[in-house]
Image (cartoon, rainbow, N blue to C red):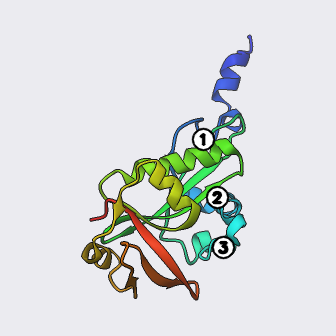
Amino acid sequence: MSFDYRAYLKNNILLQEEFHVGKWVNLSDKEKEEYASDIFNLINTAYAPIGGNVNYKSAADVLGSEADAYYEVINIDADPEPDALSAYKKQPAGNKLAAIGHDGSSEAKSKVINHYADLLKQKGYYLEVSGKLKDILLSKGAPVVTDPELIKKVLKGKEIEMNDDGTYQRYLGGSLHTKTLLGNPI
């Protein structure tokens, strides 16, 4: 009786990649539970330069206050762990992009930003954004929504004050922010 080492390696679940390299994968609810710490760490790394994400203070938020979010991850290197993440929430106006995450590498940052730009060009995806991310997404051709009536419809129930340039102001996390709506909602 001979031992087939190649078959052993191919079929050993412990040696297989958890996420295929280069492919965005939607996490199931079970995977969301399993990877809650990884999800938080990716988001925390992405938002660290601006003091963190107001909705994600710990891994518990992934299954707690942000349990209604859907997560897509991508693995871009040899290790089997996710390197970048896109989070969105289903809303009446479409899929609202809610958070990004990455491992801090330039390649992971680029993957998630390009993914966001691609999603925003599709019908049914939108994002409230400001700052550097807004500038980057605009440079990648993300559509801008400036129609005040459409913005009010998309953000129904949110108190906003429109600016003359199509941006708006609203309170987030107790602070007033100027935001721009990007994408193709509704």
Which of the pair 47/82 is nearer the observer? 47
Q: Crowding near pointer 3: few (<14 within 10 Å), some, many (20+)?
A: some
Label 2, label 3: how far apart the Cα atoms are: 12 Å
Q: Answer yes or no: do the residues labelled 3 and 1 have beta carbons within 8 Å?
A: no
Residue on which disc 3 sits: 60
Location of residue 6 by image quarter: top right
Q: Answer yes or no: do the residues labelled 1 and 2 have beta carbons within 8 Å?
A: no
Residue on which disc 1 sits: 19
Q: Secondary structure at mark 1?
A: loop
* First along the sequence among labels 1 and 2: 1
Residue 113 in percent (x, y) is at 54, 50
Q: Answer yes or no: do the residues labelled 2 and 3 have beta carbons within 8 Å?
A: no
Report the residue that reaches farthest toward the front.
164
Residue 75 in percent (x, y) is at 62, 42
Q: Secondary structure at mark 3?
A: helix
Location of residue 153 by image quarter: bottom left
Q: Secondary structure at mark 2?
A: helix
Which of the pair 100/129 is nearer the observer? 129
Q: Crowding near pointer 2: few (<14 within 10 Å), some, many (20+)?
A: few
* First along the sequence among labels 3 and 1: 1
Up-down relation of residue 126 to residue 151 (above or below): above
Which of the pair 85/152 is nearer the observer? 152
> Of the residues tagged 1 and 2, which is closer to the observer?
1
Residue on which disc 2 sits: 34
Circle 2: residue type:
Glu
- The residue sitting at 53% across, 71% down in the picture is 67
Query: In the rendered view of the protein, which quadrant contains the N terminus?
Result: top right
Label 1, label 2: how far apart the Cα atoms are: 13 Å
Circle 1: residue type:
Phe
